[in-house]
Amino acid sequence: MKNLKYVVALFACVLLFSCAKERTFNIAGKDTVVHPYGFLNDLDEKNDSVVYRISIPDVVISVVFCESIIVPILDCGYFLFEPVRKLKPGESRDLIIERRKF
């Protein structure tokens, strides 16, 4: 029973924290906060003038907790892609691959 409390506490912490962070960009002369998005909220949160990349830590968390079903759905559904930078003028979104800097 004691171990179950630790598992539930860890599960709650994972649900509350995402590794993908929001960022602020100057878009059209205004500071705009750009939030991460996933498959469930891509129409609401995705900004077409920002380049995104996959959040690897969120993918790892989803794989580790895949048996719970809830964590991968919430994590990949809302926090899979994180904003990286503003799209440069004349740049196409099609072949942009941003590498993570460690």
Image (cartoon, rainbow, N blue to C red):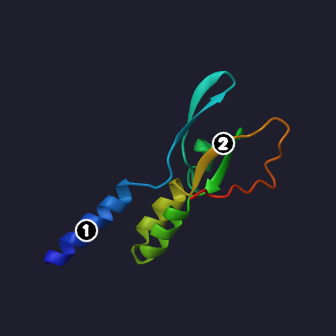
> Position of 24 compared to 5: left or right?
right
Q: Which mark is residue 8?
A: 1
Q: In the displayed structure, would residue 44 be above or below residue 77?
A: above
Determine crowd level at label 2: few under 14, some 14-19, many 20+ residues with C-alpha closer than 10 A.
some
- State the SS at label 2: strand
Q: In the displayed structure, would residue 18 be above or below residue 62?
A: above
Q: In the displayed structure, would residue 94 be above or below residue 22?
A: below
> Position of 25 compared to 74: left or right?
right
> Position of 35 compared to 64: left or right?
right
Quarter of the image where one finds residue 4: bottom left
Quarter of the image where one finds residue 70: bottom left
Q: Position of residue 29 (x, y in %)?
A: 67, 21
Q: Position of residue 68 (x, y in %)?
A: 39, 73
- In the foreground, 5 or 70: 5
- In the foreground, 26 or 42: 26
Q: Position of residue 91 (x, y in %)?
A: 83, 42
Q: Quadrant of the C terminus?
A: bottom right
Sooner in the amino-acid sequence: mark 2 or mark 1: 1
Q: Residue at x 59, y 42 (%)?
A: 44
Q: Position of residue 75 (x, y in %)?
A: 48, 60
- In the foreground, 24 or 16: 24
- State the SS at label 1: helix
Quarter of the image where one finds residue 8: bottom left
Q: Residue at x 54, y 42 (%)?
A: 35
